[in-house]
Amino acid sequence: MNPDDEKILRLAKEIVIKFIELGRISPTNFESHFKSIFWALKNTVVDAQAPDFTRDLSAVPPGDE
């Protein structure tokens, strides 16, 4: 598991718990809400990450820079 995934899981759990405490989510529909919250967070994190230019530069053969 990616370290970011573990952080996202914890954050999604905290959000779902807060919504349960507020009465917005019930334990019976927890699974569907948890999945949608997790994927919304994951997509946000992935979209916000800057590209890894060092990895891209290492793929360029020497002299072609």
Image: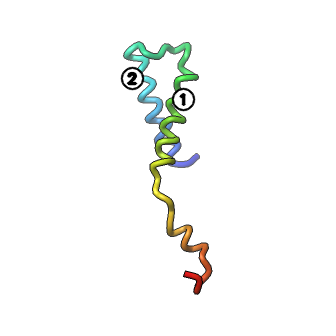
* 17 lies left or right of 27: left
Of badges 2 and 1, the one in the foreground is: 1
Residue 60, x across and y down, in percent: 60, 76
Q: In this view, does 28 lie above or below 42?
A: above
Label 1 crowd (10 A; few <14 / some 14-19 / many >=20): few
Q: Earlier in the sequence, mark 2 or mark 1?
A: 2
Residue 5 badge: none
Q: Position of residue 19 (x, y in %)?
A: 41, 20
Residue type at mark 1? Ser
Q: Mark 2 points at which residue?
A: 18
Q: In which quarter of the image is the C terminus?
A: bottom right
Q: Distance between the residues labelled 2 and 1?
A: 15 Å
| Residue at the disc numbered 1 | 36
- The foreground one among 39 and 28 is 39
Q: Residue at x 47, y 32 (%)?
A: 12
Foreground of the two, 49 or 2: 49
Q: Do the residues labelled 2 and 1 touch (CB within 8 Å)?
A: no
Q: Is residue 6 above or below residue 36?
A: below
In the structure shown, which secondary structural element does the residue marked by tag 2 occupy?
helix
Q: Element at badge 1?
A: helix
